[in-house]
């Protein structure tokens, strides 16, 4: 199966999953497609692109991990799991810190997906009017950059995220 065909299957799976069990009010499909598109344009392999498309699927849909593995393989599942919050951690700050550390432990591909995710979300920072929330989101993104710098600091996605983050100060 060719790269484009595999990516289309992941898009179809994402769309079917949201229709079946979507539970997030944000535009998850659009966001997920943008993350996948960014990774594809940047030249990442098919598994990274698919994991980017599916990065929110465990958090936002009732999808079994086994289903992801069966359809897309162990590597995709591993990358999606690395990019999913541990819901058992109730403190939001500790939850995102644990997620970023886990991404770093899993490796560059996981960090690149998370960086593309944050970069896509960052486009909407100007809409945040609550000063406290804005500061918390800024702090979260800055923490990610600290965690990821040694592994992907030379990657375009990291550099774009860093530029975007600090251009809004």
Image (cartoon, helix red, strand yellow):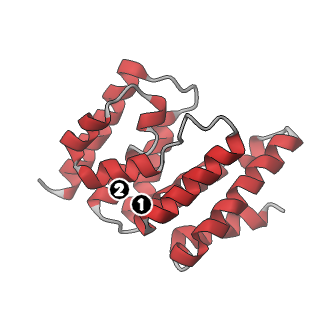
Q: Earlier in the sequence, mark 1 or mark 2?
A: 1
Secondary structure at badge 2 equals helix
Q: Quadrant of the C terminus?
A: bottom right
Residue under numbered circle 2: 49
**How much space separates mark 1 and mark 2, taking CA atoms?**
6 Å
Q: Nearer the viewer, residue 2 or 142?
A: 142
**Residue 33: image location, x then y, percent:** 42, 45
Residue in the picture at 69% in, 40% down: 92
Residue in the picture at 19% in, 40% down: 70
**Residue 34: image location, x then y, percent:** 47, 49
Residue in the picture at 58% in, 68% down: 148
Where 59 sits versus 139, above or below? above
Secondary structure at badge 1 equals helix
Residue in the picture at 70% in, 38% down: 91
Q: Left or right? Give the position of 141 relative to 45.
A: right
| Discs 1, 2 touching: Cβ within 8 Å | yes
Q: Nearer the viewer, residue 4 or 111?
A: 111
Residue under numbered circle 1: 39
């Amino acid at each position: 199966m060719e790269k484009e065909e595999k990516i289309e299957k992941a898009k179809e799976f994402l769309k079917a999953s949201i229709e079946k069990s979507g539970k997030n009010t944000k535009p998850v499909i659009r966001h997920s497609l943008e993350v996948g598109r960014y990774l594809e344009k940047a030249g990442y392999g098919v598994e990274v692109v698919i994991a980017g498309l599916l990065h929110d699927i465990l958090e936002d849909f009732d999808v079994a991990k086994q289903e992801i593995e069966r359809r897309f393989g162990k590597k995709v599942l591993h990358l999606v799991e690395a990019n999913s919050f541990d819901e058992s951690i109730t403190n939001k700050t500790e939850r995102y810190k644990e997620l970023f550390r886990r991404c770093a432990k899993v490796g560059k591909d996981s960090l690149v997906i998370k960086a593309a995710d944050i970069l896509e979300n960052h486009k909407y920072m100007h809409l945040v009017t609550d000063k406290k929330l804005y500061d918390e989101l800024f702090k979260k993104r800055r923490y990610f950059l600290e965690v990821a710098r040694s592994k992907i600091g030379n990657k375009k996605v990291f550099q774009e995220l860093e530029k975007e983050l600090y251009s809004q100060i």
